[in-house]
Image: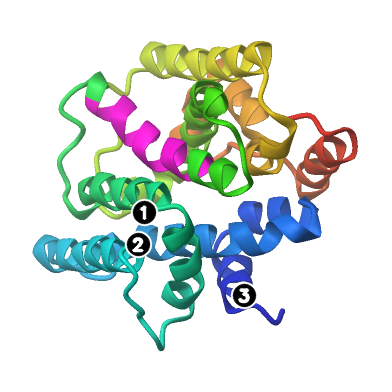
Amino acid sequence: MSDPCADLVHDGDRERFAATMAAPVDARPKLWPLYAANLEIARAPWASSEPMVAEMRLQWWIDTIDELANGADRRGHPVTEALAPLLRADPALAVLLSGIAEARRWDCWREPFPDRAAFDAYLDQTAGNLMWAAARALGTPTDSERPIRDFAWGAGLAAYFRAVPELEARGRLPFSDGRPGTLRALAAEGRSRMALARSKGVARVARPALWTGATAEAVLKQAEHDPRRIAEGRLGLSDLAEKWALLARALIGRY
């Protein structure tokens, strides 16, 4: 790879790398910086076992994103260099990325979400903000934002379910209510939101941004059928099935 942001995504975010490689060639330079920035932000809370130090790392990103949007240069960091022209062209992208960093403050601490509303907000501000930012960078009209956020909520939930074993291994409490019935209902809601997004329709130009959720519905279906698979780390498809799910969407332009 010749693009440093693409290299970062290749090494740290396999699904978004594959989805971006399936996107039209002219779309990729708009997606790599966003996905690389998201990866760096997501890693920041885990860079230190001290919550305050981790929050300082997130604050650095929040401050830097704001400065880039206001015309400052941050030379020497491949992600900030690639982000700068995107954020200057559309400052709304900076608001979305900063929102991701703010939401990631939860990752710095060990307490569970205080309630369902806080969990919903976390998914929307992380998965929702990123998918909408990617779609917006591709030129998606604003009337597609709501269905894209619904789709992202389901895709984000599937990714969160898959991250549960690692969260627990790091001493986090992923759910305020982790009973099987609650998790089953949550998975069903995720699938419903994704179906609702499809029923409303999304502009074709946005669809490569949604391909990052190509396997999400299958994962949610597994969790709904047997919620024990979440904690046991038994969610997901084979490599071949993952590739086919993405290829099928790219070939026919669905999401």
Residue 119 relative to residue 212: left or right: left
Percent of width and height locating residue 80: 42, 73
Nearer to us in this view, 175 or 207: 207
**Circle 2 is placed at which residue position?**
69
Q: Residue at x 37, y 14 (%)?
A: 182
The three-letter code of the residue at mark 3 reads Asp
Question: Which type of secondary structure does the marked residue at label 2 adopt?
Answer: helix
User: To which residue does mark 3 refer?
Assistant: 7
Label 1 belongs to which residue? 94
Residue 163 location (% of width, % of height): 44, 45
Point out the stretch of residues depicted in magenta.
Answer: 118-131
Three-letter code for the amino acid on which mark 1 is drawn: Ala
Q: Are marks 1 and 2 in contact (CB under 8 Å)?
A: yes
Q: Quadrant of residue 210?
A: top right
Question: Looking at the image, is 126 positioned above or below residue 195?
Answer: below
Please name the amino acid that badge 2 sits on.
Answer: Ala
Q: Is residue 17 magenta?
A: no
